[in-house]
Amino acid sequence: MPNGPSDPVPCRVTMCRDCCCGSPKVTGIDHTAQTARLGQEAPVRVSGCLDVCDQANVIVVQPSAAGRAAGARPVWLGLVNDPDATEDIAAWIRAGGPGVAPLPDILDLYTFTPRQRRASPGTSPGGGG
């Protein structure tokens, strides 16, 4: 199992849970259950604002060590606002995630490329917004 105990660094998930993501603004989803469900498949880090509020709820799947060795980059998923999408992400992570398992066609509907942000003095690129 590519994402199991034999993988020294499994896939990791970052979930935006700030101003828009994970809030009552995005209706029809149990945000706590979504976080817990993905946490059953991979380590989850809850993040402050990722500055892509128009894509709420945002989930970033980082590749495992094996995926990175295969050249994979993090996959950004937006508008993940239904339990079926959460299950599709969980199944992909379980199969190995970026670089190990092909992205299921259904998840193509959720992928996006975040816009580049300029780092303010004293901050690192990709920090919260």
Image (tube, rainbow, N blue to C red):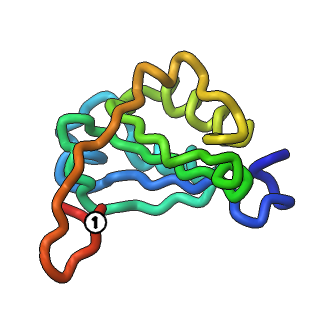
Q: Quadrant of the N terminus?
A: top right
126 in relation to 1, above or below: below
Q: Which residue is mark 1?
A: 125
79 in relation to 46, above or below: above
Q: Residue at x 30, y 62 (%)?
A: 126
Residue 39, position in %: x, y? 58, 53
Q: Residue at x 23, y 50 (%)?
A: 116
Left or right for 92, reference 22: right
Residue 97, position in %: x, y? 65, 41
Left or right for 29, reference 87: left
Residue 104, position in %: x, y? 60, 22
Left or right for 60, reference 40: left
Q: Residue at x 27, y 54 (%)?
A: 50
The extreme bottom residue here reads: 122
The answer to whether residue 94 is seen in the rendering is no
Quick one: 36 or 70, which is closer to the camera? 70
Q: Quadrant of the C terminus?
A: bottom left
* Quarter of the figure with residue 72: top right
Left or right for 56, reference 59: left
Q: How many marks?
A: 1
The extreme left residue here reads: 120
Residue 91, position in %: x, y? 66, 33
Other-residue count near label 1 (Cα within 10 Å), few / some / many at <14 / 14–19 / ≥20: few
Quick one: 64 or 87, which is closer to the camera? 64
The answer to whether residue 75 is seen in the rendering is yes
62 in relation to 91, above or below: below
Q: Residue at x 20, y 51 (%)?
A: 51
49 in relation to 25, above or below: below
What's the residue type where badge 1 is placed? Pro
Q: What secondary structure is marked by label 1? A: loop
